[in-house]
Image (cartoon, rainbow, N blue to C red):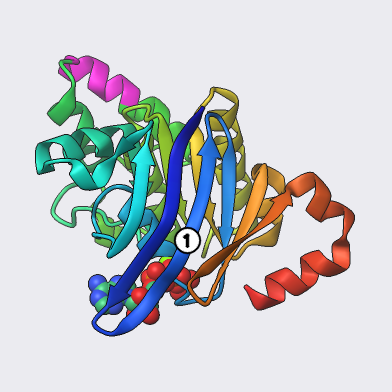
Amino acid sequence: MEVISVNHLRKMFANKTIHRDVSFKVKEGECLGLLGGSGAGKSVILRSLIGLEKPDGGEIRIDGVDISKLSEPQLYEIRKKVAYAFQNGALFDSLTVFENVAYALKEHTTLSDKDIRLKVHDLLKDFNLDGCENLFPNELSGGMQKRVGLARAIILGPRAILYDEPTAGLDPANTITIQNLILHLKESGTTSILVTHDMDTALRVCDRICFLDKGEIEDLGSVEEIKKDRTRLMSLFVRG
Ligand SMILES: Nc1ncnc2c1ncn2[C@@H]1O[C@H](COP(=O)(O)OP(=O)(O)OP(=O)(O)O)[C@@H](O)[C@H]1O
Ligand SMILES: [Mg+2]
């Protein structure tokens, strides 16, 4: 069963075509890598999947539901089910790290303050962020902001996660932490799309890879197949 299904997506900004004809599917529990040069329209695809951008044509289905037909409150439900880990973290500047990560739990669950505290604490530890609870976003490094953004995105245990360059700007140790976390979520059945320019991460965590270029998408096949052809692989990331 496909969790995410995109059919003949078309998107323009003014008279500039971003997506000419984009189709792909992501099966339950699968991690799809989405590669492509800067400005190719990767982030626009992710935003479209949760209704933050309105396509000019084609359809997007989440668990079989065509999201173009949904009202704002229904889209809100989709955004609980499909988390978006923004490229820049997109933290609330006036809230602390704890408050940023706890936000969705306070909004959408009936957990007690104590349970929220414990849950946030555990998650921050997984992201190597313990001791940072009371800091504000402007007191964090770029890599730390990114990890807080990821923690915030996954706190509700979403069905699917859209990772927008989750390892960009991270040091090797934190890159591995994030890779392990993505793998761990995948093992527990979470479906995901990983937008990245980081070859090691794509090869380690993705099941299949797509390449977006000139408004169209090419399915490059499984990571297993791609790994066998190292030359093709290298040329791909040079393009990306
Ligand atoms: N809200 C918007 N209004 C107008 N143009 C936009 C808007 N959002 C994105 N674009 C344009 O759409 C194109 C694709 O942008 P997008 O952010 O999806 O690129 P990307 O593939 O994620 O690139 P990168 O790897 O640099 O993050 C760019 O040309 C960008 O200028
Ligand atoms: Mg982007």
Neighbours of disc 1 within 10 Å: few (<14), some (14-19), many (20+): many
Looking at the image, which residue is at 43% across and 58% down? 8
Residue 20: image quadrant is: bottom left
Q: Is residue 63 left or right of residue 105?
A: right
Mark 1 lies on a secondary structure that is strand
Residue at the spot x=43%, y=49% of the render? 6
Percent coordinates x, y for residue 155 in the rendering: 34, 31
Q: Is residue 77 above or below residue 179?
A: above
Residue 148 visible here: no
Relative height, residue 211 to residue 84 (above, below): below
Residues in magenta? 111-119
Relative to residue 164, is residue 118 depicted above or below? above
Q: Is residue 185 magenta?
A: no
| Residue 57 in picture, x, y percent from top left | 31, 61
Residue at 25% from the left image edge and 16% from the top image edge: 115
Using the image as rendered, state which of residue 148 and residue 65 is in the foreground.
Answer: 65
| Residue 197 in the image: above or below residue 157 | below
Using residue 191 as the reference point, say whether residue 183 is left or right of it. Answer: right
The residue carrying mark 1 has its beta carbon less than 8 Å from ligand 1: no
Can the viewer see residue 178 in this picture?
yes
Name the main secondary structure of what is drawn in magenta.
helix
| Residue position for label 1 | 22
